[in-house]
Image: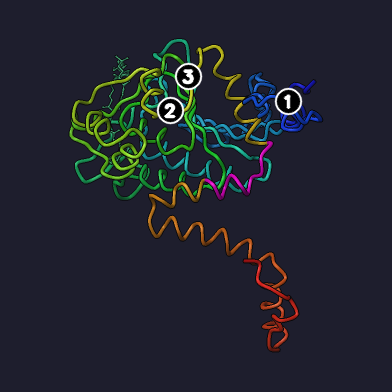
Amino acid sequence: MATPNSSADPASMAAARSSSKTAPPTPLRDGFHLVPSHPINYDLNLTNTFQDITYHISTSDHCARIAFNRPHVLHAFRPTTINEIRHALDQAQDDTRVSVILLTSNIVPERTPAFCAGGDQTVRSSDGGYDDGSEAVPRLRVLDLQIQMRRCPKPIVAVVRGYAIGGGHILHMCADLTLAGEDAVFGQVGPRMGSVDAGYGSVHLARMVGQKKAREIWFLCRYYSAQEALQMGLINAVFKNDELEGEVGRWVRRMCMLSPTALAVAKAAINADQDGSAGISLMGGHITRLFYMSDEAKEGREAYLEGRAPEFRKIPQSKL
Ligand SMILES: CC(C)(COP(=O)(O)OP(=O)(O)OC[C@H]1O[C@@H](n2cnc3c(N)ncnc32)[C@H](O)[C@@H]1OP(=O)(O)O)[C@@H](O)C(=O)NCCC(=O)NCCSC(=O)CCC(=O)c1ccccc1C(=O)O
């Protein structure tokens, strides 16, 4: 029996092994149904000086939770919001207590549920970006956040309740996985109000849902239910609203049990297909970091520091 508040879950991983040599094949051998599905307990509040987001960590479930915290505008983002998320994401990426990162929103009873209603139109500048007075020049900082999410080696999960619209919709798409409550609503609105994302918001969308559907989403600016989003491959799963947090816990705990390096490499490989030289460069960086840990690379460094020729032949063969 797994201990509550712990991601240690030998039962679900052990399900892959059986003493029987004749057991019938079944998908249940992945053990996923055995992973505990209680909500994650966040024991560290690192919100600190953040204004527009909250930032928590669960040390038992090895998970960071970054949440939009502007419910009065359905979590529409301004530059401050985006820069705070970038800062929190940096922290989570380098925090060895964290294996999985959630991007979500704080749902409050007095406001319509929303993940994020996109860029805050009250601070949209006529000078090519968004300007809330926190930066010298108006920028589209959200584009930097999208790239940061793609390059982060840890899995990022968007947990969506309510509206995920415009730039908010694109952020859930840039997450590695999206888990939604049954009240989630997805859509692009740029062409209704003089905006467009010609980057991931278009290209990545088309890869996910197909060319025709991506054009429909942008050309008609319709909204889609969580079930419709699931059918078109835009999200991974839909749960009843009151079961969502527990199921998020289950998905997080399963990822925490798996090899973090394997997950990082899988993420980099899937993204490299779309991210061109930048994607290959990230994969190359992963390889170089692993290579630096080898005796062969260490010999090169030691020889340089000792002012001698490297003796690579004493390490018999390449790792490849
Ligand atoms: C989502 C709605 C349909 C929900 O409608 P409803 O439930 O009736 O709620 P409202 O009463 O409309 O909203 C409550 C409250 O929130 C305020 N609000 C909502 N959205 C925004 C917003 N985006 N900006 C500012 N304020 C917002 C609303 O005014 C209300 O305030 P009150 O004071 O209570 O009146 C509906 O809310 C809706 O349609 N919202 C607008 C959606 C929208 O237009 N979003 C912007 C899309 S464009 C974008 O996101 C671009 C972002 C970007 O930076 C970018 C630019 C270029 C390239 C790429 C990107 C990128 O993001 O990648």
Give the structural element (helix, strand or loop) at label 3. strand
Mark 2 and mark 3: Cα distance apart in space? 8 Å
What span is colored magenta in the figure? 257-266
The disc, 3 or 1, on the residue closer to the chain's N-terminal end is: 1
Q: Quadrant of ligand 1?
A: top left
Q: What separation in Å lies between label 1 and label 2 (alpha carbons)?
A: 33 Å
Q: Is mark 2 within 8 Å of ligand 1?
A: no
Q: Is residue 129 above or below residue 290?
A: above
Amino acid type of disc 1?
Answer: Ala
| Residue identified by numbered label 3 | 238
Q: Position of residue 248 (x, y in %)?
A: 57, 24
- In the displayed structure image, the side of residue 305 where residue 169 appears, left or right: left
Mark sitting earlier along the chain (1/2): 1
Label ID, residue 302:
none
Place residue 225 in its image quadrant. top left
Q: Residues within 10 Å of mark 3 (few under 14, many from 20)?
A: many
Residue drawn at x 54%, y 11% is: 242
State if disc 3 and disc 2 touch (CB < 8 Å): yes
Compared with 264, 219 (above or below) is above
Residue receiving disc 2: 235
Q: Amino acid at mark 2?
A: Ile
Which residue is rendered at x = 72% and y = 27% of the image? 12
Work out which residue is located at the far bottom of the displayed protein and give it: 308
Q: Which residue is mark 1?
A: 23
Q: Is mark 1 within 8 Å of ligand 1?
A: no
> Main structural element of the magenta stretch: helix, strand or loop?
helix
Disc 1, SS: loop
> Does the segment drawn in magenta span residue 124?
no
